[in-house]
Image (tube, rainbow, N blue to C red):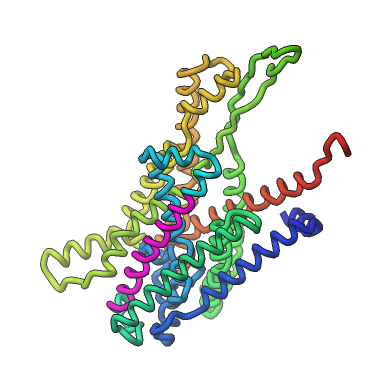
Amino acid sequence: MFQTFKNAFKIPDLRKKILFTLFIILLYRIGSAIPVPFVNGNMLEFFTEYGTATSGQGGIFDLLNTMSGGAMSQATLFALGVQPYINASIIIQLLTIAIPALENLSKQGEEGKKKLNTITRFVTVALALIMSIGYYMLLKNEAFGLPVLNNTTWFAGVVIVACYCAGASLVMWLAEKINESGIGNGISIILFANIIARLPSGAASVWMTAMNMFKQGGVHIALGILFIIAIVVVMVALVGFVVFITESERRIPVQYAKRVVGRKMYGGQSSTLPIKLNMTGVMPIIFASTICSLPSTILMFITKPESGFGLTVYNFFDTVFNPNTSVVYIILYLILIIAFAYFYVAISFNPVEVANNIKKNGGSIVGIRPGKPTADFISKVLSKITLIGAIFLGFIAAFPMVLNLINSGMFGSIAFGGSSLLIVVGVALETVREIEAQMTMRHYKGFLD
């Protein structure tokens, strides 16, 4: 990987793209540190402590805070991060399957893609406005038990909501600039930078846990050393496992028939149809996290009843949807990951279309008749591959939660470490592939050379 970046810097065009991407990331990190007017600066430290203390308790704000690189816990300009843009992209992608007009736009090439991008921008702004109002109401209602806003008038509310909405729109613009003039996917690169920005605080949390062991003396010193070694070994092993699964694929052999056109013969060669083991990426985890986090998030907006049936219902949801103490939460989380994995594959991969394309090009899967039998065979293989990929996603996402369930004080800071790890590894591999492709294209020698 490092050799790839070293070689890329030797090419002026690629060097400009990489430096431009780094500059956009720098601008984003600066925006993540700019405070919003009328927010009590003395409470920022409390928010940070709150996010650390309650990490992994199931609130959607824990995940959003990780995705925003800590900006949400500090109520800064880019507190919403890339989440509105991601949600808008997912919504438009799903609606493309359900609404014929959008489906037609997706098939109109570059022109249709531009129109879909315009629609996605408007949806992003609308979602950013909704999330901004919700976040402002959370701060205004003192959901965390302390006054956060210096001014609660309607004018202050309009300014705060406008700042958050403008910040989300600016993040969308920065991401699109990376797509146009930088390296990699803009949203993925910003997400990658946000998660990497949270690594020092995670490492500090692990170090503080080890230091507390050291202070107890005796056998706890050895336990502290073993704790640090175990964390490093487990993280390295998980990274290697994620890379292995991410790069794994099932290759279905395809044989193309020979065709004679004029005096030339075409076809006759063998090829493969690659199907990625983890075709869905991190999307099922994001879907499942959002659904599972909704009850605990709603509870943050509700005043706890003092007695009666309301208190019983409140305590039930507070207990069941708390991954620190609830096995039910983790089981539900795993079931939703598997369900969303199948759902996402169903809307993004069409076996019938793939089978028809193979048939039109004069090809067939070895031992399978063209047409419907080919589509059925691909669907059967895809179903098995999706199950394996979903189990892998479930393991990576739930493993840190199980550790947190065993000892929240020791492993509380890594409750959402699985999804973060998948994003970091996936974006790193994707970016390296794109850089290598750009280098190959610039070093290609044609028949005139």
Where residue 445 sits: x, y (%)? 83, 40
Name the residue rendered at 61%, 59% in the picture. Answer: 178
Magenta stretch mostly in which secondary structure?
helix
Where residue 201 sits: x, y (%)? 54, 72
- Is residue 219 visible in the rendered image? The answer is no
User: Is residue 376 located in the magenta-colored stretch of the structure?
Assistant: no
Q: How many marks?
A: 0
Where residue 302 sits: x, y (%)? 23, 69
Asked whether 93 or 281 is in front, the reply is 93
Asked whether 32 or 208 is in front, the reply is 32
Name the residue rendered at 37%, 63% in the picture. Answer: 60
Horizontal side of residue 331 vs 378, given as left or right: left
Residue at the extreme left of the image, as rendered: 308
Q: Quadrant of the N terminus?
A: bottom right
User: Is residue 120 located in the magenta-colored stretch of the structure?
Assistant: yes
Where residue 355 sits: x, y (%)? 51, 24
Q: Is residue 331 above or below residue 192?
A: above
Name the residue rendered at 60%, 21% in the picture. Answer: 361
- Is residue 269 visible in the rendered image? The answer is yes
Asked whether 425 or 171 is in front, the reply is 171
Horizontal side of residue 103 vs 176, given as left or right: left
Q: Is residue 77 above or below residue 247?
A: below
Name the residue rendered at 75%, 44% in the picture. Answer: 441
Which stretch appears magenta?
Answer: 116-141
Q: Quadrant of the C terminus?
A: top right
Q: Quadrant of residue 153?
A: bottom left
Residue at the extreme front of the image, as rendered: 111
